[in-house]
Amino acid sequence: MKRDRESKVRDLRFSALGVYLQGMKTSLASRMAYRGDFIMSMFIMMIVEFAGPLITWIIYSNGASFPGWNQYEVLLLQGIFLLSRGISFPFFMGIVWNTIGRVQEGTFDLLLIKPRSILLMSIATAFDSEDLGKLIGGILIFRIALKNLPPQPLSHWISFMVLFLFSLIMMFAFGLFMSGLGIVWVGNYRIYDIFMTVMEFGMYPKSIFSKSFQSILTYVIPVSLLASHPASALLGSVDGTVLPALFSSVIFLLLGIAFYFKMVKNYTSAGG
Amino acid sequence: MIHVSDLRKVYTAYERGSSFGEALLSLIVRKKKTVEAVRGISFDIEEGELVGFLGPNGAGKSTTIKILTGILYPTSGTVDVMGFTPWKERKKYVRHIGAVFGQKSQLLWDIPPLDAFYLNQAIYRIPDREFKKTVNDMIEMLDLKDLVKKPTRQLSLGERMKCEFIMAMLHKPSIVFLDEPTIGLDVIAKGKIRDFILEQNKKGTTFILTTHDLEDVEQLAKRVIVINHGDIVFDGNMEKLKLHLGDKRTVHITAREKINLENNGGIVVRKQSSDYEIEVELDLSVVKLDEFIHKVNEESKIRDLSVEGPDLEEIIKKLYTA
């Protein structure tokens, strides 16, 4: 019985999740070597993320509004957007910086000589603790918005959870495209800026955009899944465009995976 | 153990001039250039060998090593290492190899090497008991003691390099690729690292050593492969390498009386500091060493004499510039 339990623990430690957790542990230990900088960076990350909700507050304080959304509904959407970033950035979006940096300095090779998926190695060595500030900010705004909105039934919460999972999948797909580009487009940190700009569209209700642009945000690059659709699901106002958006997000993820591994195959390494 | 046949790697590189105008132009139009980094090389390495892989910068040795470690895909050719094709079965294959890069650290700067070892334990699925034993054995062999518990940034270069070796060999690889493992180290640290490599090699680990340090090559490698312009220009043991430019010796003589030696039949005067001191190169296929010494002693009364083997640096230089 005891041996059985020990073997289960060992299996977990050596699983992909175990490697990831060990990577996270070493990364945290590494970052905490500079405590002052660590705490300040986390705090700054949180403050910076309040910019979007602050604009919303200014808009609504001046009598303007986003059509079809009241102030706390928009805050809820932005809280969800921050939650999505707050989970994805520290836990797996670090892959983008990690890949771009390692390819540039030639240490991507060190990940390729490990007997694990290169994707797992890139994520496991990229845990970004500073971005936990985004998560704290997201939880705060989400909580404030919920407190000021009527309670939602369980069915809304379930739909929300499903769509929020797709929001994280979208983030991951974005990460794969950016990292893939970082492998062949050596040292191009602007990749990250392009990604951030595209993602910003997800911070506002999609109803504020023109019909044609809404179609792009739903069917081509389903950014609306990042926050707009999950927020609508929680508020019980999800529309029929959600299903095509879900389908697009799955396609987007599959394309992201294929693109990433194709780029790994084209990796040329740095000189000796 | 390693079989390489007709291996080729061709890159497409972009040329950009050095002037500002050319740099500006390169934003719009870039000139493509095809670089043949490896040109159809073939070689075999047996289990337990310690092979020196030499070549000038840009010769293609790093590209070859990166293909052998599964990092790069070749353009054509076949590679079979322990039954694996490295780039096709990378995950399964790299479990059996280790690598130490003198200029790329696998350790984490702000945390102790021991923490980095734990990360490798999870990656390579090393059971606790085996992990502890290997780490302790290697710490003892490399004389590291509690240093593995200090943050990496507080360790000296030599201590860090020793930890890199532990990191690379925790999973007991059958083949270890070493890229400049002694770069920047002092003589004592170099000696310790070389002893460790020899000891592991005696236990059966195959080593492939890439280096520019010829002392490493002389002291470690039993066989040398020299690559230049993407081709193998030499493949043989150290003795064969030393005879590559002929069986030559450098003789330094100080005598009591004047030395009268001139360049002729197998004798080349390399340096004459005074009438009583001379350095000559002898081609032993033409001149017999004992007869030469006897003749000089008769004529000039030798006071001091030293005989040095062939100059490896000279031989390598010739191979690189050939």
Image (spheres, grey):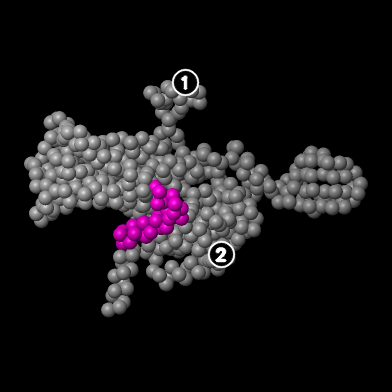
Closest to the observer, B153 or B201: B153
Q: Which mark is residue B310?
A: none
Q: Is residue B142 visible?
A: yes
**What residue is shown with label 2?**
B144
- Of the numbered discs 1 and 2, the one sitting upstream in the chain is 1
Q: Is residue B83 visible?
A: no
Q: Position of residue A11 (x, y in %)?
A: 31, 67
Instruction: Look at the image and tell me in which quarter the N terminus of chain B lies.
Output: bottom left
Kind of residue at disc 1: Gly
Residue at the outermost top position: B21
Separation (CA) of disc 1 from disc 2: 54 Å
- Above or below, comparing residue A17 to residue A7 in the picture: above
Closest to the observer, A167 or B24: A167
Q: Position of residue A87 (x, y in %)?
A: 28, 51
Closest to the observer, B202 or A167: A167
Kind of residue at disc 2: Leu
**Residue located 13% across and 44% down the image:** A232
* B268 sits to left or right of A72: right
Q: Please say whether residue A18 is one of the residues in the magenta stretch.
A: yes
Q: Chain of mark 2?
A: B
**What residue is shown with label 1?**
B21
Q: Position of residue B322 (x, y in %)?
A: 59, 37
Magenta range is: A15-41
Q: Mark 2 Cα within 10 Å, few/some/many (few <14, many 20+)?
A: some
* A91 sits to left or right of A207: right
Residue at the outermost bottom position: A1
Q: Please say whether residue A255 is one of the residues in the magenta stretch.
A: no
